[in-house]
Amino acid sequence: MKTIEEINQKITKGEAVVVNAQDIIRLADEDGLSRTAREVDVVTTATFGPMCSSGAFLNFGHTKPKIRASQVWFNNVPAYGSIAAVDAYLGATALPENDPTNSEYPGAFSYGGGHIIEELIAGKEVRLEAKSYGTDCYPRKSFEKTITIDDLRNATLTCPRNCYQNYNVAVNATDKTVYTYMGKLNPKFGNIHYSTTGQLSPLINDPYYKTIGIGTRIWLAGDQGYVYYHGTQHDPNAARTPNGVPKEGSGTLSVVGDMKKMDSRYIRGVSLTGYGVSLSVGIGIPIPILNEDILKSTTVSDNDIKGQVIDYGYDYPNAIANTIAEVSYGELRSGSVEIYGQKIPTAPLSSYPLSLEIAEQLGNEIRQGKFQLSKAVQTLPGPEVIK
């Protein structure tokens, strides 16, 4: 029906019709799938929430004399230095070496790698320390300097697992409070936490990866980035609803982008009491409406998306596969769900309002001709591909 090249030509001319994944549901219902598929060129999707499997490659440039940094710290938070002379990888979950962690339970985990990534993007000063054993070609054994992101030769956000396609819904069935990566869960079904943006979420709107693949240009924390591979733990074989949407954690994306062009509004260090630190990442992905089938997938609503309620008090930590209930994202976003006759309050770890803002910002950039779509050079592994 359409091609990405034809849509890009319309973007260049300022004629592309762009609708976010929330509004396309109403539009398709009013005008019908066939007409909407002809008239709409792009549907924008987005998510913003904690994505622990995130980090950054940071290159601080050669010193005089040169150093082959085998140990690197940023504000006393260790980065992985066993790469090359002045390259380091700072993981979002890295903690300062003097952090008390959970020795004083529950630990506060007030600072870590995710916070440093946010601070660098915000232009703040960070203390760099590097050490080495010294070699003939790299004789220097130590280096310290207060830097900003402008002092770094390269700063590349490189995240091996982002943008989960659906996820668990967390509850605590035990009689004691537990602290998890899904937040603080009160005993005896005291609360429920979830962590996707449902009908706005990118891979929910492209359930079989027909448009999102390796090489897809995305909106990443305020700048253009790319999908560089399927993410770690990518599992397209999850159980699905009749409309193809996975009912549990499924596909994931590996993404990359230039930190020097990002906006700290859309990337935030996160402290999770009793668990650790993380990084909330804002991602927007455009879906080209090439045909009616692709459009139909983008009209999925929160009421059609199911999540599995999992006990994080006992079952999850003990690797027991057990689903307590299945609920829709419509129910979750209503503020409460009923399980075993008990009305339980719900809360998201992801931000729907900020995700909607990202989807709209991406849409505006497309309308203004600032963001062109890219055709994937290779599709992501689909069902029955990964075992």
Image: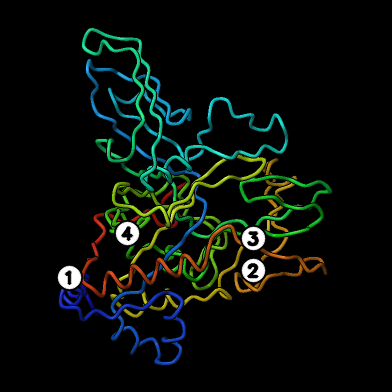
**Amino acid beneath label 4:** Ile
**Which residue is tagged 1?**
5
Q: Which is nearer the N-term, disc 3 or disc 4?
A: 4
Q: Which is nearer the N-term, disc 4 or disc 2?
A: 4
Q: Is residue 249 above or below residue 320?
A: below
Front disc: 2 or 3? 2
Residue positioned 40% across, 90% down in the render: 32
Q: Is residue 253 above or below residue 348?
A: above
Mark 3–mark 4 CB contact (< 8 Å): no
Task: Estimate how packed mark 1 is, as few (under 14), some (14 to 19) or many (20 or more) residues with alpha carbons within 10 Å.
Answer: few
- Cα–Cα gap, marks 1 and 4: 17 Å
**Amino acid beneath label 2:** Leu
Q: Which is nearer the N-term, disc 2 or disc 3?
A: 3
Q: Which is nearer the N-term, disc 1 or disc 4?
A: 1
**Which residue is tagged 4?**
218
Q: Which is nearer the N-term, disc 1 or disc 2?
A: 1
